[in-house]
Image (tube, grey):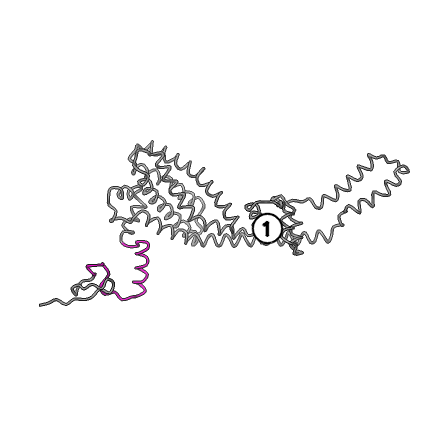
């Protein structure tokens, strides 16, 4: 008796009826499109969110260095691939932290805009209440009778020079108030209020006429910041640049491991370790940020958890590289020291500069 066959909707090849999956391409033979199926397929295809993730998650959290060691020993289908785990957990981390960054950016923008409005209000009040500053013509007018009656008043040339210097100094006091950026904030606010040409404003801010592109870009962004105090936008741009920076920081961390363990395998081995370690870091900080959004956890607990990541690194290095605990502690300390005090600050400074120039 001939067995009935069905045709696969994906590869269009025939196979015996009753098979749950197509033996040719592996697609499920009869799968109605539902919300559950749609989202499960999406997540599993792009992030491998399947049983391997749950098998990998617990060892990642409680067995430092275990997953990296298992991967290098050839067990690459039992646990989630290190790069896939890093990608999936980092997406969750940056999604959670985005809420905190947005809230912080809004508060920063509100505070700085309020500060600018108060500064402009005070400037207008001071202009209306203060006596008008002396200009060059007024100084000359006041000096003229003194010079004319110099002999009658018993004044010598030195006395006249002192009088002229005093009046000139008083005139300059009102127009020589600079901000931390090195320009007269009140004068810039006045030019903005009257709608002055931006070229004039840039000149008053200190930009030279033959400035190069980077310098011009800096003053454009500086004026934008002065107008709307866009700290929040800079913070958001900075945060958006961090995921890109991580693709450089992680390989640099692996490079440090290669330097300290140059005889423990090729660079790719250390990269596997780094993927799993950074996955652990993102998991821990995702939990901390997530809990802080619900409850206000005491700062000492946050710092204790942050410090525990170094203890995890020490155990992971000891288990993965199989060296004596003292040598592992020393090397993990040196790697952390170099990474935190040299690599990360340099990257953050570059990111901050990039965020300011392109926010």
Pointer 1: residues within 10 angstroms few (<14), some, or many (20+)? some
Looking at the image, residue 214 sits to the left or right of residue 343; the answer is right
Position in image of residue 62 (x %, y %)? 31, 44
5 to 176, vertically: above or below: below
Secondary element at image label 1: helix
Q: How many numbered marks does the figure carry?
A: 1
Quadrant location of the N terminus in the rendered image: bottom left
Position in image of residue 34 (x %, y %)? 30, 66
Looking at the image, residue 304 sits to the left or right of residue 219; the answer is left
Position in image of residue 117 (x %, y %)? 62, 54
Residue at 75%, 43% (x, y): give it: 170
Looking at the image, residue 337 sits to the left or right of residue 321; the answer is right
Looking at the image, residue 100 sits to the left or right of residue 325; the answer is right
- Does the magenta portion include 29? yes
Tell me which corner region of the image, top left, top right, bottom left or bottom right, holds residue 269.
top left
From the image, tell me which residue sits under label 1.
Answer: 223
Front residue (pair 313, 350): 350
- Does the magenta portion include 53? no
Outermost residue toward the front in this view: 210
Tell me which corner region of the image, top left, top right, bottom left or bottom right, holds residue 157.
top right
Front residue (pair 340, 306): 340
Q: Which residues are magenta?
A: 21-50
Outermost residue toward the left in this view: 1
Residue at 82%, 36% (x, y): give it: 159
Position in image of residue 120 (x %, y %)? 65, 53
């Amino acid at each position: 008796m001939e067995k009935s066959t069905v045709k696969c909707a994906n590869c269009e090849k025939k196979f015996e009826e009753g098979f749950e999956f197509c033996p040719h391409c592996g697609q499920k033979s009869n799968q109605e499109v539902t919300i559950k199926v749609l989202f499960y397929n999406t997540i599993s295809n792009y992030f491998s969110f399947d049983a391997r993730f749950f098998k990998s998650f617990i060892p990642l959290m409680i067995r430092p260095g275990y997953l990296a060691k298992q991967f290098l020993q050839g067990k690459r289908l039992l646990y989630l691939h290190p790069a896939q785990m890093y990608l999936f957990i980092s997406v969750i981390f940056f999604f959670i932290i985005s809420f905190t960054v947005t809230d912080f950016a809004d508060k920063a923008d509100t505070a700085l805009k309020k500060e600018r409005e108060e500064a402009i209000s005070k400037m207008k009040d001071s202009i209306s209440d203060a006596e008008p500053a002396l200009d060059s013509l007024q100084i000359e007018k006041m000096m003229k009778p003194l010079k004319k009656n110099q002999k009658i008043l018993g004044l010598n040339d030195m006395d006249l020079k002192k009088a002229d210097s005093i009046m000139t100094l008083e005139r300059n006091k009102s127009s020589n108030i600079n901000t931390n950026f090195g320009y007269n904030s009140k004068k810039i606010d006045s030019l903005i209020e009257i709608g002055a040409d931006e070229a004039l404003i840039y000149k008053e801010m200190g930009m030279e006429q033959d400035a190069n592109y980077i310098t011009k870009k800096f003053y454009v962004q500086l004026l934008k910041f002065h107008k709307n105090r866009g700290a929040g936008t800079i913070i958001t741009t900075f945060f958006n640049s961090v995921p890109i920076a991580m693709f450089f920081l992680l390989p640099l961390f692996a490079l440090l491991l290669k330097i300290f363990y140059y005889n423990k395998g090729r660079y790719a081995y250390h990269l596997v370790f780094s993927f799993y370690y950074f996955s652990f870091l993102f998991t821990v900080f995702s939990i901390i940020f997530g809990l802080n959004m619900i409850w206000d956890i005491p700062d000492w607990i946050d710092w204790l958890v942050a410090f525990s990541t170094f203890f995890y690194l020490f155990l992971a290095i000891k288990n993965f590289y199989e060296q004596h605990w003292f040598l592992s502690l020393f090397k993990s300390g040196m790697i952390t020291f170099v990474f935190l005090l040299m690599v990360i600050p340099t990257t953050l400074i570059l990111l901050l500069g990039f965020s300011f120039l392109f926010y």
